Image: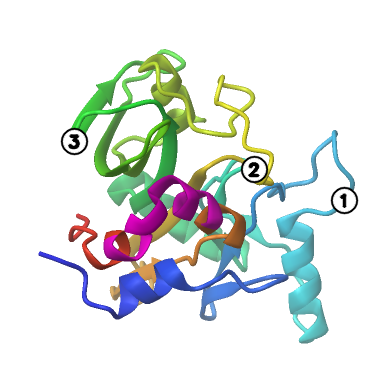
Amino acid sequence: MSIKESGKIKAFLAVKKPGLDILYEDEWIIVFNKEPGLPVHLAAEVDDHNLVELGAELLAKRGIEGKLRPVNRLDRGTSGVIIMAKSATAAGMFGRMVKEECLGKLYLAIADGRLPEEGTIVAPLAGKESETRYRLLFQGGNGAFLAVYPLTGRMHQIRQHFKLSGHSIMGDKRYGGSSVPALAGHALHSFRTILTHPATGRKIEIFAPLPESLLAVIAGLAGDAFIPLLRSLPELP
């Protein structure tokens, strides 16, 4: 089954908006499309430019004071969907939801080398069971464009698992990925997140447009097959 040229395709082709890109918002949460290279929290090695503070400044301009609390994690170099709770009550509610039900997460990534059509990487991280599944979307000469599904939520799970498989994520300096100077971070993007809203019971599916730099790397990898690739992406679970 192919993706219709609607939600998923439009999200893939759309260029991420400059500045803070809000994907979804209600009274409980605000969901951003985080740009690569932007830390979520204040980090010792960078200035105070971070998503929590920028998000709080945005709300303050609307007359809403308060602290934003991340519901899920994204590494500094990873882009895409990140959920922020607007209050301690919302943080507790969504934190329990994540712990009990997990988020349905789909990442898009480019890994070094050649990979099979699909695979599962099972390797403990920090002494805990960890599992990552992937599906090959396009095989280039020096890299593979993948749909990646982390079934557990360990720190740096996707990046560590692909390093252990011998196919590090491109641009990931920490875990041995090949250098991609055009990328502000590494070739890993949280593309889709599905959750059941704990306050309303409604199922929410959120897509995050890819950074322009990552789209350019994918286009370079796929060459003339880039547009046909978009139109034949499988229905991703």
Residue at 42% over, 58% down = 191
User: How far is the residue under mark 3 from the one under mark 2?
Assistant: 26 Å
**Where residue 25 sits: x, y (%)?**
53, 78
Give the residue at mark 1.
48
User: How far is the residue under mark 1 from the one under mark 3?
Assistant: 42 Å
**Where residue 12 sits: x, y (%)?**
41, 66
SS of the residue at dot 3?
A: loop
The numbered mark, 1 or 3, whose residue comes first in the sequence reads 1
**Residue 31 as seen in the image, left or right of residue 98:** right
**Residue 138 as seen in the image, left or right of residue 91:** left
Q: Is residue 80 visible?
A: no
Closer mark to the observer between disc 1 and disc 3: 3
SS of the residue at dot 1?
A: loop
Tell me, what colour scheme is on the image? rainbow
**Residue lying furthest left in this view?**
1
The numbered mark, 1 or 2, whose residue comes first in the sequence reads 1
User: Which kind of residue does numbered mark 1 sit on?
Assistant: Asp
Give the residue at mark 3.
117
**Residue 51 as seen in the image, left or right of residue 143:** right
| Magenta highlight on residue 110 | no
**Residue lying furthest front in this view?**
224
Give residue 185's mark.
2
**Where residue 6 sits: x, y (%)?**
30, 80
Magenta residues?
216-228
